[in-house]
Amino acid sequence: MGAALPLNDPVLLTLTPGSEYYVKTTSDYNPGNYLISVNSSSTPPSMNIPDVGVIQLTPNTWANGELTTANGNVQWFKFTATDAAQYIHFNPGTLIGAYACLYNSDGSPIEAYSSISSNHPLSRTVTSGEVYYLKVWEGWEGTGTFQITFNDSNTPPADIPDVGVIQLSSNTWANGELTTANGNVQWFKFTATDATQYIHFKSGTLDYAYACLYNSDGSPIEAYSIIYSNHPFSRTVTSGEEYYIKVWAGAAGTFQIGFNKSTRLVDNILTFNTWTEGNGEQWFSFIATDTTQYIHIEPINMVFPSPMFFYYLYDANDTYISDTTIVGGGSHSETLTIGQAYYINMSPPGNGTYLISFNNSNIPPAIDLPNENVTQLTFNTWSNGELIMVNDNIPLQWFKFTATDAAQYIHFNAGTLENAFLIRLYASNGSAIRDDVQTIGIQSLAQAVTSGEEYYIRVWGVGAFQIGFTDTSSPPPSL
């Protein structure tokens, strides 16, 4: 019979005890030396570990290795285990990969051999404090240089760069960008302010990345993590010590990164009844002043595809309270505890800008109305409007009119609008009065006003439309 006989993968034969058998070996590859044995166990006999030429390894420190014809394309290393699980890391030089097998000090193998390369460490369960031997060889591709080390993490130690490392400050976002110029890798450093530190990531054009925290000597603190918005990773560190963060991804893109001792990194603290500007996904905090609080949203410039705002509310213990969707701006009420801190995560689609505030009324704070590019409406007359998207920005258009009666009807004709558009009416002091969504056809909205006062209308969407006002439910005559 014939069978392939891979290294450390024995062939099981059913034989007759006491009978003599012969084994013939051949190879389709390059000629070379090898060892062969037979026994009644799937575990091979102990290896004869060499007495000289064995290189001592230190955890988290790269050691140079080289396979040559002089050493038979085999090199031995040894180390003392520092944990119950040890990872053997390989850093390619002229040799891009190899085979490796870990042995006890008596030469018995710990599991079968494995291939090893830069992204595929070899892991084994061992006994801390015991000495182990590592055999590295390359049977087919010949000679080459490499580096090897071990630690208790599936992340290898890093060579921290001397320049280009960005300093982080606690509770402060820092800009980052992965580019082809920096190999889609960027380094940051910080001084720990607590025994537990959270690393926060905010997506820009980069949705997520990989990140690993290192001691100042380049040794990793646990394995790397996938990091993305609202999913920080934490590590146990020593307050006052300096640490390094490596961020990398398979693609280029922008992002922000920060650290603190909390599961969230707050961008702004809200002031009662005062607008605060936000940009894209952000965290906000506030202290409740009443049992009923209203969260108000006012869009400035939103990005396609949707003018919707998502927000998630948490208490100071990071307990989820509620979430809601506000279309095109508006208000939402929450029942809270006076004097307690709360946190809002705003998640608008895209990286649009907006205003956010809180108070104890369903009437939001006043905004600054525009002084220019506002179309004056004439009583009982249609006025044309057109909203054109530029660079994925959802456009808006402003109109104003002077009330002619205590009740006015505002009329809209959806025209060629591609999607529903949003209408918000303001008093002359910038206070929002009402919100409506217009879909198709003509819609007439009755509104109590003060005769002689000026009012502003913000229209938001994409496409052409008509707008006008009268004092009855009948729209203006056709244009």
Image (spheres, rainbow, N blue to C red):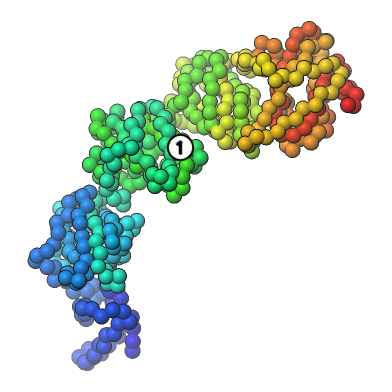
Looking at this view, name the residue that lies furthest to the top: 452
Can the viewer see residue 68 in this picture?
Answer: yes
Figure check: 427 above or below 212: above
Measured along the vertical axis of the image, is residue 33 above or below residue 283? below
Q: Quadrant of the C terminus?
A: top right
Q: Secondary structure at mark 1?
A: strand
**Can residue 128 be seen here?**
no
Instruction: Say which residue label 1 marks.
Output: 255
Residue 323 lies left or right of residue 395; in this view the side is left
Q: Please provide percent x and percent y for residue 233.
A: 38, 39
Mark 1, other Cα within 10 Å: few <14 / some 14–19 / many ≥20: many
Q: Quadrant of residue 355?
A: top right
The amino acid type, in three-letter code, at marker 1 is: Phe
- Is 236 in front, or is 69? 69
Q: Position of residue 253 (x, y in %)?
A: 47, 42
**Residue 246 figure quarter:** top left
Q: Residue at x 24, y 76 (%)?
A: 41
- Please tell me which residue is depicted at 61% across the width and 25% down the height of the picture: 300
Total marks drawn? 1
The image shows residue 19, relative to residue 276, as above or below, that is: below
Horizontal side of residue 430 vs 235, given as left or right: right
The quarter of the picture where residue 357 lies is top right
Above or below 108: residue 351: above
Q: Is residue 18 left or right of residue 410?
A: left
Q: Position of residue 125 (x, y in %)?
A: 25, 58
